[in-house]
């Protein structure tokens, strides 16, 4: 090989290594970004999902489980965000519970990253931002933007058709990696099924009374601004909906979980445990197919002129104007809905009471923003900071 | 299904590593700069997969 050929190959090879390093670094950084959570005064125990199913130990889905226990006994409420990691309001609402809520009676159990694997990847070909940053007085906190589905690095390949266990119902192939289609799961199934099985075991062993799954939805999807409830929770959900609409200044409806649609939390948790299962949906214009640019600004501001135009054409199931649906509004809907669920549950079940204080509610979040309530991990004792 | 997934994943990574090795060999043997650039561009996503980055 001539010296000039060798020099050219070395130069091109070095350039390729630079390209490989730059692209590989961006994927690596996204997958390994550590998100600090300050465990507020209410957190009495931190464990992980592997406690409930050891087969998730050491996987991307061995999520943190935060337990907030009151001094007096009572019922147990379980709140989980991040079932779909591309719906940040659910994660952030759960985040604020861990950082601020204190429990007087009963227990509150919280998971911030129900499908942690899904938070380490974004939607292929959808141009999602890898991260988003919430401004705070201490500089801002950066979070992973995720996808609806378990990362293919953790579970692959997908089958031609996803056959749900145990119902045998046929679902779209990609839903084999959708946490909210894989309940109640099985101990030695796919990673997604093992994760849902772990959550079911948590719910059964901890004798959870109400399980709340926090979501967001595109405005073109009919199930939006609503509480989806298992039939066991119809009265509870209806009372929560009426009270929120009356007192909190936002409208939220109620829908019943279809009996024959399997794999979803609002169906399977209610069917396979003693718990009442509820799912809350807030609006997220970022997910709408008609959106324009797909960036962190649209994700957080909830403003998009094309989605507004779709609304004017009557194509949406939720209202939207130029003000959009800011993240504080969406998070506030969830935190107030959780707080109201706890109050209404206790009102209906005085023998299993739960009393939780200091949950930032809708009006306060709209006024001050989410960043106002995110705690500075640099100011917290090291043993009170966990990482998602 | 879990066993099949495991076998297919192993085979996939073996194939990817094999293809990457072939591309690298082709790059070394190439005589013109445009072919070399082509092989390297194609090689990058294969390596990202082999290294479990993407």
Image (cartoon, coloured by chain):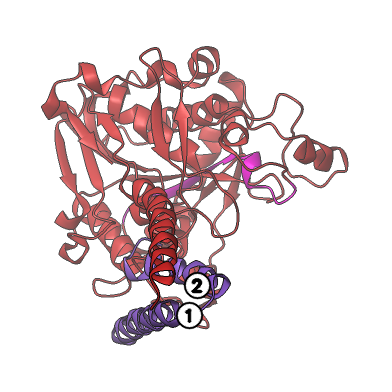
Chain colours: A red, B purple
| Residue visible at 86% across and 37% down in the picture | A312
The stretch of residues the image draws in magenta is A274-290
Give the residue number, with chain letter if any, for mark 2: B36
Subunit that carries the residue with mark 2: B
Residue A25 located left or right of residue A48: right
| Residue visible at 35% across and 80% down in the picture | B21
Q: Secondary structure at mark 1?
A: loop
Say which of B20 and A12 sits in front.
Answer: A12
Q: Earlier in the sequence, mark 1 or mark 2?
A: 1
Query: How many residues crowd mark 1 within 10 Å: few (<14), some (14–19), many (20+)?
Result: some
Could you say which quadrant of the image residue A385 lies in? top left
Query: Residue A367: percent from the left, percent from the top?
Result: 54, 12
Query: Residue B13: percent from the left, percent from the top?
Result: 34, 79
Q: Secondary structure at mark 2?
A: helix
Q: Which mark is residue B6?
A: none
Relative to A221, is A340 above or below? above
Whether residue A346 appears in this view of the structure is no
Subunit that carries the residue with mark 1: B
Find out whether residue A279 is within the magenta segment: yes
Query: Residue A145: percent from the left, percent from the top?
Result: 46, 44
Whether residue A207 appears in this view of the structure is yes
Say which of A388 and A94 sits in front.
Answer: A388
Give the residue number, with chain letter if any, for mark 1: B30
């Amino acid at each position: 090989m001539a010296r000039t050929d060798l020099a050219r190959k070395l130069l091109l090879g070095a350039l390729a290594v630079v390209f490989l390093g730059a692209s590989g670094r961006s994927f690596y950084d996204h997958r390994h970004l550590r998100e600090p959570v300050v465990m507020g005064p209410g957190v009495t125990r931190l464990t992980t999902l592997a406690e409930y199913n050891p087969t998730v130990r050491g996987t991307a889905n061995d999520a943190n489980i935060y337990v907030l226990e009151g001094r007096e006994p009572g019922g147990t409420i379980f709140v989980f965000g991040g079932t779909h990691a591309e719906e940040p309001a659910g994660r952030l609402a759960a985040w604020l519970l861990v950082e601020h809520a204190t429990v007087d009676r009963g227990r509150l159990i919280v998971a911030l990253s129900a499908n942690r694997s899904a938070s380490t990847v974004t939607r292929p070909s959808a141009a999602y931002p890898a991260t988003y940053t919430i401004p705070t007085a201490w500089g801002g906190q950066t979070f992973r933007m995720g996808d609806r589905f378990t990362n293919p690095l953790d579970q692959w390949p997908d089958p031609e058709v996803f056959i749900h266990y145990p119902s045998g119902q046929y679902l779209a192939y990609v839903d084999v990696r959708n946490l909210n289609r894989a309940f109640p799961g099985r101990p030695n199934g796919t990673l997604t099924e093992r994760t849902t099985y772990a959550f079911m075991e948590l719910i059964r062993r901890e004798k959870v009374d109400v399980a709340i799954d926090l979501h967001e939805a595109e405005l073109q999807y009919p199930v939006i601004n609503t509480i989806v409830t298992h039939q066991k929770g119809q009265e509870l959900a209806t009372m929560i909906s009426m009270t929120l609409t009356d007192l909190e200044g936002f409208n939220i409806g109620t829908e019943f979980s279809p009996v024959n649609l399997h794999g979803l939390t609002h169906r399977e948790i209610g069917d396979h445990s003693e718990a009442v299962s509820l799912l809350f949906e807030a609006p997220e214009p970022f997910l709408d197919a008609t959106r324009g640019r797909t960036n962190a600004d649209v994700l957080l501001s909830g403003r998009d002129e094309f989605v507004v135009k779709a609304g004017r054409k009557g194509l949406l199931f939720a209202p939207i104007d130029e003000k959009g649906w800011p993240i504080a509004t969406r998070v506030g809907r969830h935190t107030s809905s959780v707080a109201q669920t706890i109050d209404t549950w206790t009102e209906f079940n005085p023998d299993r009471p739960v009393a939780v204080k200091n949950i930032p509610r809708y009006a306060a979040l709209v006024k001050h923003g989410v960043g106002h309530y995110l705690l500075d991990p640099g100011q917290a004792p090291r043993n009170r900071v966990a990482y998602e | 299904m879990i066993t099949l997934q495991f076998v297919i994943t192993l085979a996939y990574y073996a194939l990817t590593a094999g293809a990457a090795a072939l591309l690298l060999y082709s790059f070394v043997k190439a005589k013109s700069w445009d072919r070399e650039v082509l092989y390297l561009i194609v090689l990058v996503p294969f390596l990202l997969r082999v290294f479990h980055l993407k």
